[in-house]
Amino acid sequence: MKTRYGKIFFGASAVLFGLIALMWHDPDTWQNLHEIWRLPFGGIIGECLMGAQIAAGIAMQCPRITRLASIVLSIVYLCFSLACVPATIAASNRYDRYGGSFFLFFSLLCGAIALYASTEPDAARALVLGRLARLGLGICVVSFTLGQLLLPRETASLVPKWIPPNQMFWAILTTIAFALAAIAILINRKVRLATGLMTLMLALFGGLVWAPRIVAQPQTHFIWSEFALTFLITGAAWMVAGLRSF
């Protein structure tokens, strides 16, 4: 999978999520990131982080400043990940109890680190950063697997009914796919194939699950948020898939 296209995809998704978050200042759009608002000057901090995400998503398309953009994205996604920690600690549902939201944003951090690694001229340092991004993403995929395993009916309900043979079949199949991808990524075997196929699966998930819902319910902010975040995770996985360190 060409990294150049992955950069465009990752950057465009970052811009989209940043824009809708600035347009709609509500928990449905920001999801667990609304915890940032509780901080002193939290509203300003949140908007600055979203603005930085948009700027970095655009800047990463320019080779001369891709490195700087990856640093900015790393800082933004680290802040986003930390903002989800309180919800994980005080989780009232099984998804967040196993760090679902935290690992969602942590996977984006892994994508930003992979982007930085791709600009690193020192081969040894690039190898270390690439390994860090790979292992981090692998842990995130374990969380994605657990999320679907613990919530099979909720996962199945997202599958369009028109896709044969049935919704539960695809819920089980994608859970197995996530599990196999996690194993491959963590043990460093066939990583490029595993991350590439997972990237394709996530892209199809965004296109088949969330895109039709946007058309049907364009006023629902949560759907827009899930659409953007799904493609952001897709872009992050694409960044890791494009690494030369494995």
Image (spheres, rainbow, N blue to C red):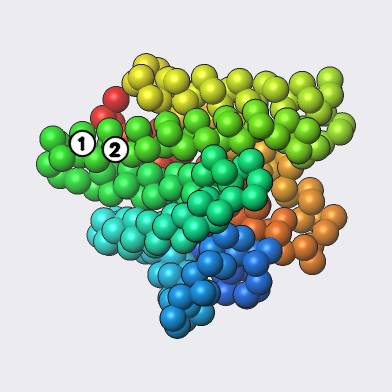
Q: Classify the position of the C terminus by image quarter.
A: top left
Q: Could you tell me residue 160's position as x and y percent?
A: 81, 36
Question: Quarter-wise, where is residue 69 in the image?
Answer: bottom left
Quick check: can you spot residue 89? yes
Relative to 21, does residue 85 appear above or below in the rendering? above
Give, as a three-letter code, the residue at label 1: Val
Structural crowding at the residue carrying mark 2, measured as other residues with C-alpha within 10 Å and reported as few (<14), some (14–19) or many (≥20): some
Q: Residue at x 12, y 41 (%)?
A: 122
Q: Could you tell me residue 242's position as x and y percent?
A: 37, 35
Q: Is residue 22 left or right of residue 110?
A: right
Q: Residue at x 50, y 58 (%)?
A: 86
Mark 2 lies on a secondary structure that is helix
Q: Is residue 93 left or right of residue 81?
A: right
Pointer 2 residue: 132
Give, as a three-letter code, the residue at label 2: Leu
Q: Is residue 167 left or right of residue 226?
A: right
Q: Is residue 222 left or right of residue 157?
A: left
Question: Quarter-wise, where is residue 131 in the image?
Answer: top left
Structural crowding at the residue carrying mark 1, measured as other residues with C-alpha within 10 Å and reported as few (<14), some (14–19) or many (≥20): few
Q: Are marks 1 and 2 in contact (CB under 8 Å)?
A: yes
Q: Classify the position of the N terminus by image quarter.
A: top left
Q: Could you tell me residue 46's position as x and y percent?
A: 48, 73
Relative to 241, does residue 110 appear above or below in the rendering? below
Give 121 or 71, whichever is nearer the viewer.
71
Quick check: can you spot residue 159? no
Q: Residue at x 45, y 44 (%)?
A: 107
Give 48 or 140, whichever is nearer the viewer.
140
Q: Residue at x 58, y 22 (%)?
A: 177
Pointer 1 residue: 128
